[in-house]
Every structure is written in structure tokens, then in C-alpha cells.
Amino acid sequence: MAMTALLVWANWSGETLADGATADRVVVWKAKRQLELYSHNKLLKSYAVSLGRKPVGPKLQEGDKRTPEGLYAIESHNPRSSFHRALKVSYPSAADRLAAAKRGAAPGGDIMIHGMRNGLGLIGRLHRRLDWTAGCIAVTNPEIEEIYRAVPDGTLIDIHP
């Protein structure tokens, strides 16, 4: 009974984003573990997130397990990701590549907003108990479904410390 209650709680998505809602900006607040969708400066919805395993500070190089900080864009939608849906973030920027090169490092890449690893969707909101990604921004599967529909390619994403 307790396990059933835990799974129900973990997979309850709360209030859903209005059908047809379209975001023109995504804002991520790393310190608050929060992703916000905006349309014409109006908050549409916010989501609790998990980040890279080393969430403090900007991404410096490939493999550092950090989530980038800065202004990027959503480059593409991937319905066949190894995670439940994914939106590709345009990291690294030219400035990120240059800064990494000055340090003699590769900047890394493949930064995504995604759901849970395929087959692990029942974890639901429990994933938020720790930062577990390799640098991506993770939400639950129902949440990525909403975000995937509402955020078109080219949408700006501003990732704050």
C-alpha cells in the first residue's frame, strides 16, 4: 500500500499546461532547481528540475557533470532519445568553445532538457531528490511532454546560476 501511494505521488503531475500554449522563452534557475516557461513575459508554468551531478558553476569542459550557464536556444526536438523525449540546447556557444580551448579542453555538448531514462519513468518526481544528469536538465515524463509541445525550435533558453 505504501509503495502504491509513493508511486501515485511520484507520478502526479499537478496542474497541466494549457493546450496550445506556446513558450517564447525558457528560464532555468540552477540554484532553485527550477525551469520556467514564458510567453510574452508572462509565466506559463514552472517545473522543478534535476541538474548535472556538479550543479554549482558553469560548464567548463566535457565530462565535468555541470549544467551550462548563459543564453542559448533550443536547437531541435528528439522524440527517439534514450531519455523520454529531449530538447537539444545550443551549448556550446562560440564563447564556450573559445574559453574551453584556452584551457586546453573540449567544451562538451549534447546538453538537453529531457525526461527520465527510457524504462525508468515510474521514478517520476522522486528523481528530484538529487542532481543526477551528466549536465542536462531533467524533468518527469509528463512534464517533458508538456515542454516538448510548448517550446518550438529556436526558443531562447537563459540558464542562470
Image (cartoon, rainbow, N blue to C red):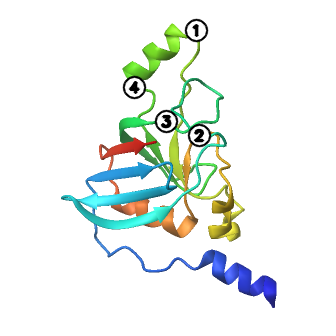
Q: How would you rate the neighbour count of disc 4 (Cα within 10 Å): few for under 14, some for 14-19, many for 20 or more? A: some
On screen, 64 above or below 145? above
Query: In the rendered image, which residue does mark 3 sit on?
Result: 68
Q: Could you tell me which quadrant the N terminus lies in?
A: bottom right
Q: Is residue 81 left or right of residue 46?
A: right
Give the CA separation, mark 1 to mark 2.
20 Å
**Residue flagged by tag 1: what amino acid is it?**
Gly
Residue 104 is labelled as 1
Helix, strand or loop at mark 2 = loop
Residue at image coords 68%, 55%: 130
Q: Is residue 134 left or right of residue 13?
A: right
Residue at image coords 38%, 20%: 94
**Residue flagged by tag 4: what amino acid is it?**
Ser
**Residue flagged by tag 3: what amino acid is it?**
Pro
Query: In the rendered image, which residue does mark 2 sit on?
Result: 135
Give the CA separation, mark 2 to mark 4.
15 Å
Residue 93 is labelled as 4
Q: How would you rate the neighbour count of disc 1 (Cα within 10 Å): few for under 14, some for 14-19, many for 20 or more? A: few
**Residue flagged by tag 2: what amino acid is it?**
Gly
Dot 1 and dot 3 residues touching (CB under 8 Å): no
Helix, strand or loop at mark 4 = loop
Mark 4 or mark 1, which has the lower sequence index? Answer: 4
Q: Quadrant of residue 62?
A: top right
Of residues 98 and 161, the one nearer the viewer is: 161
